[in-house]
Image (cartoon, grey):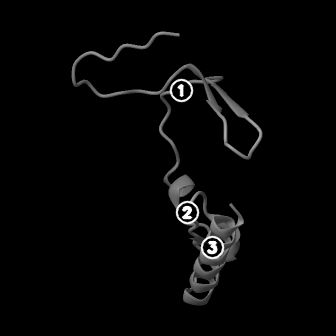
Amino acid sequence: MNVEFRGAGRRGFAIEGTTRRRGEHEPPVTTRVKLIEFSDAVLDKSLFDVPAGYRRALPRPSVASMTKPDTVANRLAAYWQDVTTSARDFYRF
């Protein structure tokens, strides 16, 4: 596939696309996105309301952890885990 962008026009969404990611210590991941439906109908505003009981996910360096809420105690525990894991990995080599 060859994609060219010309000018400063507004970008849209791809009709079809494939993304491949290869981590050093992880199996390769391939993600395919394909447009299956298109509509110019107006969306109901309630679709964008924050759901009852919503809790912000705990941010992590690579991806948010959906298992714990974003609290000071959980952030400190997560940062401590990251520091100890990094130190252990550093001294392992």
Q: Which quadrant of the view contains residue 82? A: bottom right
Q: Which quadrant of the view contains residue 69? A: bottom right
Q: What amino acid is found at the position of numbered circle 1 in the picture? A: Ser
Q: What separation in Å lies between label 3 and label 2 (alpha carbons)?
A: 16 Å
22 vs 76: above or below:
above
| Of 86 and 33, the residue lying toward us | 86
- Can you see residue 12? yes
| Marking on residue 61 | 2
Tell me: 70 left or right of 40.
right
Between label 2 and label 1, give the one nearer the viewer. 2
Q: What separation in Å lies between label 2 and label 1 (alpha carbons)?
A: 36 Å
Q: What separation in Å lies between label 3 and label 1 (alpha carbons)?
A: 51 Å
Residue bearing mark 3: 87
Q: What amino acid is found at the position of numbered circle 2 in the picture? A: Pro
Q: What amino acid is found at the position of numbered circle 3 in the picture? A: Ala
Count of numbered circles in the view: 3
Residue plotted at (61% across, 75% down): 55
Residue plotted at (53% across, 62% down): 49
Please tell me which of labels 2 and 1 falls first in the chain: 1
- Can you see residue 54? no
Please tell me which of labels 3 and 1 falls first in the chain: 1
Whether the residues at callouts 3 and 2 have beta carbons within 8 Å, the answer is no
Residue bearing mark 1: 39
Which SS class for mark 1? loop
Between label 3 and label 1, give the one nearer the viewer. 3
Q: Residue 61 location, x and y as percent?
A: 55, 63
Neighbour tally class for label 2: few under 14, some 14-19, many 20 plus, Cα within 10 Å: few
Q: Residue 63 location, x and y as percent?
A: 60, 58
Q: Residue 7 location, x and y as percent?
A: 22, 19
